[in-house]
Image (cartoon, grey):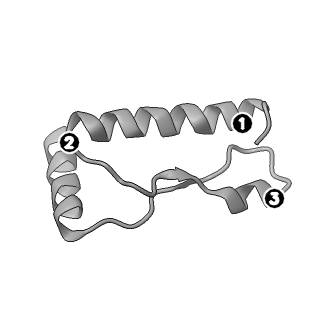
């Protein structure tokens, strides 16, 4: 990973998303930067990989998003 501004932007978004999920008691264990994004030559931030979750986590995430609207 580089110190490019787009990388810093992606890391900041990742940090904010983890914190927002944690505030609702939700952890997505595989939430991370999408490493294949670094293979591209785009100047945009790398993608975030939301990963997999179990049914309970998906249900809690949906409920948190409904409340946030």
Q: Position of residue 41 (x, y in %)?
A: 86, 54
Determine which quarter of the picture holds residue 53: bottom left
Q: Pick the quarter of the image with the C terminus.
A: top left
Q: Decide if residue 69 is in sight here.
A: no
Q: Residue at x 63, y 33 (%)?
A: 9
Q: Which mark is residue 63?
A: none
Q: Is residue 64 left or right of residue 38?
A: left
Whether 8 is drawn above or below 10: the answer is above
Q: Position of residue 43 (x, y in %)?
A: 80, 44
Front position in the image: 62 or 27: 27
**Separation of marks 3 and 1 at Cα, in angstroms:** 13 Å
Q: Residue at x 53, y 50 (%)?
A: 32
**Separation of marks 1 and 2 at Cα, in angstroms:** 29 Å
Whether 55 is drawn above or below 5: the answer is below
Tag 3–tag 2 contact (CB < 8 Å): no
Whether 54 is drawn above or below 20: the answer is below
Q: Which residue is mark 3?
A: 40
Number of the front mark, 3 or 2: 2
Q: Which residue is mark 2?
A: 25
| Mark with earlier residue (3, 1) | 1
Q: Which mark is residue 6?
A: 1
């Amino acid at each position: 990973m580089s110190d490019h501004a787009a990388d810093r932007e992606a890391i900041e978004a990742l940090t904010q998303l983890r914190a927002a999920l944690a505030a609702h008691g939700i952890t997505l264990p595989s939430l991370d930067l999408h490493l294949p994004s670094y293979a591209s030559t785009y100047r945009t931030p790398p993608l975030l990989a939301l990963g997999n979750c179990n049914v309970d986590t998906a249900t809690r995430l949906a409920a948190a998003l409904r409340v946030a609207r």
